[in-house]
Amino acid sequence: MANSWGDMTQSKNGFLSGAIILFFCSIVSKALGALYKIPLLKILGTTGLGEYQMILSIYALFLVISSSGITITLSKLIARETRYKNINNQKKYLRISFLITLILSSFLSLILISISPILSKFQSFKDLKICYLAIAPALIFSSLIAVFRGYFLGKRNMTFSGSVLIVEAGLKLVFSLILSSKFAYMGATGAVFGAVLGITICEVLSLLFMLILYFFKKRTKNKKSISQIVKNKSKYNKTSKPLSFNYHFLHCQNSRYVSYKNAFFEVLKVSFFVALQSCIFPLVGAIDGLVVVPLLLKTGISQSIAYSLFGIEDGVVATIVSMPIVVATSIGSALIPNIKSQKKPDVMIQNALKVVWLISIFCGTLFIFFSKGIVQFLYGSGLTSKTFSELTISSDLLKINGFNIIYISLLSVSTSILQGLDRSKIPVKNLLIASISRFIVLAFCLTNSTTNIYGIALANMVLYSVALILNLKELKRYANISFSIKNIFLLPTFSLVSVSLSLYLLKLILYPILSTKVATLLIVVSVLTLYTLLLVSTKVLNIKDIFAFRKKNN
């Protein structure tokens, strides 16, 4: 059984490398997304960006309904069948998932087209209807991409799964910008139409790329299998000995049979609560896209300014905030198919939470103390309205969201852990409770002329913090994890205070002698290096602990 146990150990040892690959692919795609928003902001302006984000918020909800549950479910099922080396069942789960997703995404695409007049009217802009028609087909192609991403995640092939993120971001950068510029002569709505049409074209090409990867991988694997069979047959003929117990063990695993009917119901059963949980955030975003502008109008703000404020919050600030969160989502994606394969998953869970915590508190501190410089570095050239100070509002929103980075990151990874432990219902319940609290705060703050657009950031803080507290409470029941107050709170706090003082001194020294962008880049790199060195020197970040789960369980 040496080969079998070796394969299982190799599977478990692939978690960290898979998480790192996903992280770098995600960070590159997020960087391209942030880069994409810079020229897009110049083309659309903050008003057009507000319209663009309102459309994407509705699109994101439909996309999550049609794809997110399948991605996570398929990754878990494929990971399970991969451990048993059952290729037939893997194919069945993939085909069933593909069929379910194709039917569901096509149905949702038709619904989006049919209700587009109602949506555009409710959003106080009837011309947005044509934009919904342009982006609706992208639902089908993007959902099918998600199926193959789930398949590759289950196979531990993080390179293929992550590479499509980069391809999507790169194609969107090219096609959306070209088409938005081409249709800009029609005004802001025409430019928005070009941008969303570019997304549809991007998803078509990304699906073709994913299909090429899939068939390339399949063809390569078939060649290796044939070569291995010939080698084993030749070896058996020479020895003329009975087949080893290892062969009988693997043959027994291959005999596990799942019918298409059972596969269909199993996929639906597992994906339902995962999809339900995944829908909550996009649902919150979709509701924001429908109600934020009307509520802002009640405070006496003009329609163009209301669209601009929503574009700043949802298009500029949300894009910046999403960049550091890719660490948590990457670790979470790698955790889900791996937790069940561990005899003692507590070390893996504890190290994942620890790494996400240390990174998120650094990013949160950086955004709180350096919000204006970050916004100006990325989007300063596009925030040039003379009606109100777009740069000031953006930096203030980012400052508030600095706290949300910590909550979102820990919420994301804790949700992934619970899903990996087959406790998918728990995050759904917790997010529903937190969402109710959020909308109460949102309704109060948006209609208040003092808080108005800042109400979204404050309401999100309530959502993420409440859901996180509830998740951690439940996680304590199902995982035996414990943390040192000294290593998790006291020493990181000391490191952050040191970093903050260094940040302040570097601002005083570099800002008068260098341009804002160059000074910002140097400061970010310097404080990140200092923070890492402090964590290592104080033994908060222990390399042995991070790699502990790579050791073979006896």
Image (cartoon, rainbow, N blue to C red):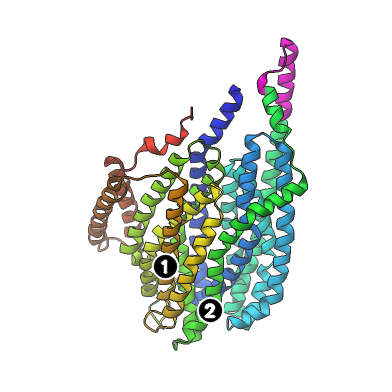
What's the mark number on residue 263?
none
Q: Amino acid at mark 1?
A: Val
Location of the N terminus by quadrant is: top right
The residue that disc 2 covers is: 291
> In the structure shown, which secondary structural element does the residue marked by tag 1 occupy?
helix
Image depth: mark 1 or mark 2 in front? 1
In this rendering, would 361 be left or right of 313?
left
Crowd class of label 1 (few under 14; some 14 to 19; many from 20; radius 10 Å): many
Quick check: can you spot residue 179?
no
Q: Position of residue 304 (x, y in %)?
A: 50, 83
Quick check: can you spot residue 1?
yes
The residue that disc 1 covers is: 462
Residue at the front extreme?
A: 477
> In the structure shown, which secondary structural element does the residue marked by tag 2 occupy?
helix
The answer to which quarter of the image holds residue 65 is bottom right
Q: Position of residue 177 (x, y in %)?
A: 57, 66
| In the depicted structure, whether residue 542 falls above or below residue 137 | above
Tell me where the magenta segment starts and ends, as one range: 225-246
Judge whether residue 229 is colored magenta: yes
